[in-house]
Amino acid sequence: MSDVTAPVAEAALRPGRWSFRLSVLLCAGGIVVLAVSVAVVLVSGVGVWGNNIPHVWGFDLIAYAWWIGIANAASLFAAILVLRRHGLRTAVNRFAEAAALAAILAAAFYPVLHLGRAWLFYWTLAYPNRMQLWPQFGSPLVWDFWGIMSHVIVTSLFWYIGLIPDLATMRDRAAGRGRMRLARTYGLLALGWRGSVAHWHRHQAAYRLVAALVLPLLLWAQTVVALEFATTLVPAWHQARLPLHVVVTGLPSGLGIVLALAAVLRVALSLERFVDDADMDLLARLVACAGLAAGLAYAHELLVGFLEEDETTRAALGARVLGQGAPAYWGAVLLSAALPQVLWLDGLRRRALVVVPVGILAAAGVWLDRWSIVVDGLLRDHLPTMSRGYSPSPAEWGLLGGTVALFALVLLLFGRLVPAVSMFETRHEESEAEAEEEER
Amino acid sequence: MSQPPPFGLMAEFTEADAMTAAVRAARDAGWTCLEAYSPYPVPEAAEALEVSAAPVGYIALAAAAVGAAFSAGAAWYVSVHLYPVNVGGRPPNAWPVFMPTTYLVAILWACAAALIGMLALNGLPRLNHPAFFAHGFNRASEDRFFLFLSAEDPLYAPDAAGRFLRGLSPLRVTEVRSA
């Protein structure tokens, strides 16, 4: 039996094609935009953004909550597949985790830049200092800080630990071809993994334990983001259902991105055998289900908001749904809840040209929902300020576009440098399938 | 110049079942210093080697308890002693609001401890290991299975160990020597 996963390792070892180089070049252009946008904020201050009173959050928190939602859904998906030992995990787990990691990296820009003096970000940590200032542990902002820290650390550890045995395979393959410098790099990262049966046993136990712990961590981290809104007195935000809304409507974004990524990677890296048609089929159905769940969340919002809530909240929701905020609200419903339903049709679900745009548009729809909450939620805020409305400045658009480029670049490099599909899980699955066939 | 003594003997197998059977036979014959290698997890072989993964869970549990105590204690000390702020007459020791960070930090510590503890239990990271000197060992990370009998084992005698391993119908048996 020769190694079934050789093509996966080959995808990372062979020289890049022109399409890969072109994509990296495009992303590098986006990184320049990101660098300029960040520099402008650092030099001039957050005044270059469109934020004002009462729109203190604007684009910043929209993008932040959106990226976190993508990371959240992708990580949840990966962890559930591991726990269920689902066949789909071998195909998509690795890049679902990578997408989560890249999304968190993109998200991290926003809260730090929003501090205004980003270089003093460490003031948010609890440490003894000369000013005798300490964070207030009763504040959702402090909860969020710890939520994001835990999310970043746990997601990256989860991803890396799952990668160690595959890095050992890359080390041995690179050494076998005499590419010693590459082999040494992979070897250092593989931490001396030698595939001992005892090591595997503990590795699998730790991996599954962390997958089980990731679920409550992520649900709570996302809930904390929603509580930052819910603890204010703004009528559109001051709602107990907000955590549920943010978690559920976030699902189409993360799953949609994973679906689009799967469709692109399997063609670009010739991995059709590992991410097969049945995997794509299942993934597309899952995105349709996530859209359905998001649709229910929107219906719940309308029912509760218009039938149960008081007059003030009804007016706030009315402005979002029927008034000035209608385009963003219904755009979100259309793109993230209604559009994924086309994936129930067999003919459409199997076409890359359909699933890639549907996945990306579902993510865009979730962005519109975050706009609807953050910006249009303030249409009826009842605050004694002169509401000036909100329009994002070029620096904010640059930051959004720049972080999208960063996300794409991280994933491009991921696809080239490390095995995009979990090789040891694939081997394991193939050996089990062979054993079953022999029994028959 | 005399050769250094060998690290032990390595038997190579093409199937996981053959390797598992070899591990069982070696355990039955009384070998204690042995290690098996495979390109993917083989739980049956780990069972035969009597490896327990339970310590990973205990480490995670202990770390969660310490992390939770540390976080809750810090929140209490900061809010009650170091920097009490009167917000609408609420008590400084409002413990329910300390719980979100306590919960998050407990999970963070448990995850980090499970993963780092797993590496520590495995004796990783390490830069080299005698097994890597074995002939064709690079395929342990692809499609071959190995059983290593260490020269440190009290039963180890080159001829007897070689005979024993060849009796398990491996693909080949090689002596593991440095360089």
Image: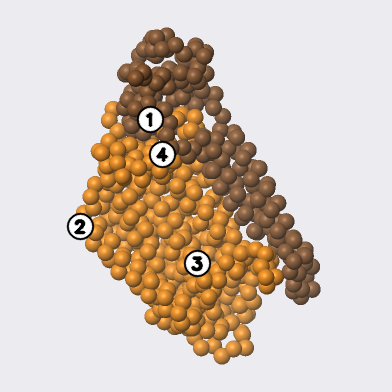
Q: How is the image coloured?
A: by chain
On the same chain: label 4 and label 2?
yes
> Badge 3: few (under 14), some or many (20 or more) residues near its Cα, within 10 Å?
many
SS at circle 3: helix
Dot 2 and dot 1 within a common chain: no
- Mark 2 falls within which chain? A
In the image, which is nearer the foreground, mark 4 or mark 3?
Answer: 4
Judge whether B132 appears above or below A136 on screen: above
**Vertical placement of residue A240 versus A277, above or below:** below
- Check disc 3 and report the residue beneath it: A65
Residue at image mark 2: A18
Do we see residue A99 in this rendering? yes
| Residue type highlighted by circle 2 | Trp
- Provide residue A260's location: percent of width, then percent of height: 34, 57
Q: Quadrant of residue B20?
A: top left
The reply to whether callout 2 and callout 3 are in contact (CB within 8 Å) is: no
**Nearer to us: label 3 or label 1:** 1
CA neighbours of label 1 inside 10 A, class few (<14), some (14 to 19), many (20+): some
Q: Amino acid at mark 1?
A: Phe
Q: Position of residue A121 (x, y in %)?
A: 55, 69
Q: Is residue A279 visible?
A: no
Which corner quadrant holds the N terminus of chain B?
top left
- The residue to which callout 4 is attached is A165
Is label 4 in contact with label 2 (beta carbons under 8 Å)?
no
Mark 3–mark 1 distance (CA, rounded to whole Å): 47 Å
What chain does mark 1 sit on?
A: B
Shade representing chain B: brown
Quarter of the picture containing the C terminus of chain B is: top left
